Image (cartoon, rainbow, N blue to C red):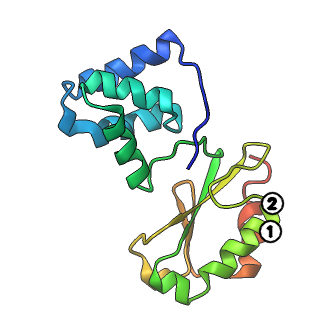
């Protein structure tokens, strides 16, 4: 997993401090602080992680370890419409890999990357707990169940003019 080098503005540093303060700068609140930071910035580049570490008085290595352990966190910017494909057992058995291949083919990007226009990004999830709807994909917060290869173009078309 790579990261993009960014330069934080003073207002961004201040926002991270406010987030850390809102959790009383407690190291045990790291995951909550990271969630709020990612909500604000859209992803967690190294510079944001460094500020979080400073704000919670913990090592950057600990912050990085949490960011890279949990699949929810991203060190790369996501598209405006992030697409997540469930690759848990039920979804996998029912064809998630073919759905994933079709998304990569249509969007011309590999898993973990964003389309050049910044519209879509593709990630995989382990399980979303909706096995009865397998295979399942999410676009942002919207869930699509029992997806087929033929549905992929229709789903993407919904976001064409947004």
Side (left or right) of 63 relative to 114 = left
Q: Quadrant of residue 127?
A: bottom left
Farthest top residue in view: 10
Percent across and percent down for residue 80 are 65, 44
Side (left or right) of 158 relative to 46 = right
Helix, strand or loop at label 1? It is: helix
Residue ID for mark 1 = 105
Q: Quadrant of residue 49?
A: top left
Side (left or right) of 29 relative to 40 = left
Side (left or right) of 74 relative to 34 = right
Question: Which residue is pictured at 25% across the width and 21% down the height?
Answer: 21
Q: Is residue 147 visible?
A: no
Front-most of 149 and 104? Answer: 104
Rate crowding at label 2 as few (under 14), some (14 to 19) or many (20 or more) other CA atoms within 10 Å: few
Residue 125 circle label: none
Front-most of 135 and 125? Answer: 125
Height in image: 32 above or below 89? above
Question: Which residue is pictured at 51% across the width and 55% down the height?
Answer: 141
Percent across and percent down for residue 110 are 71, 60
Q: Quadrant of residue 64?
A: top left
Q: CA distance from mark 2 to mark 1?
A: 5 Å
Residue 108 circle label: 2
Height in image: 39 above or below 7? below
Percent across and percent down for residue 95 are 62, 85
- Tell me whether circle 2 and circle 1 mark residues in contact (CB < 8 Å): yes
Question: Which residue is pictured at 38% across the width and 35% down the height?
Answer: 36
Front-most of 40 and 44? Answer: 44
Front-most of 22 and 77? Answer: 77
Question: Which residue is pictured at 30% across the width and 43% down the height?
Answer: 31
Percent across and percent down for residue 83 are 61, 59
């Amino acid at each position: 997993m790579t990261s993009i080098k960014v330069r934080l503005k003073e207002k961004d540093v201040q926002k991270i401090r406010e987030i850390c303060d809102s959790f009383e700068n407690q190291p045990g609140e790291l995951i909550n602080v990271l969630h709020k930071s990612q909500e604000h910035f859209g992803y967690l580049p190294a510079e944001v992680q460094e500020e979080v570490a400073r704000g919670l008085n913990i090592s950057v290595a600990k912050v990085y370890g949490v960011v890279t352990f949990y699949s929810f966190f991203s060190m790369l910017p996501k598209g405006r419409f992030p697409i997540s494909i469930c690759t848990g057992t039920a979804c996998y058995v029912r064809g998630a890999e073919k759905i994933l291949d079709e998304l990569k083919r249509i969007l011309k990007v590999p898993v973990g990357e964003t389309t050049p226009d910044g519209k879509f990004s593709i990630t995989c999830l382990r399980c979303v707990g909706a096995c009865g709807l397998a295979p399942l994909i999410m676009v942002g917060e919207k869930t699509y169940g029992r997806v087929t290869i033929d549905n992929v173009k229709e789903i993407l078309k919904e976001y064409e003019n947004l």
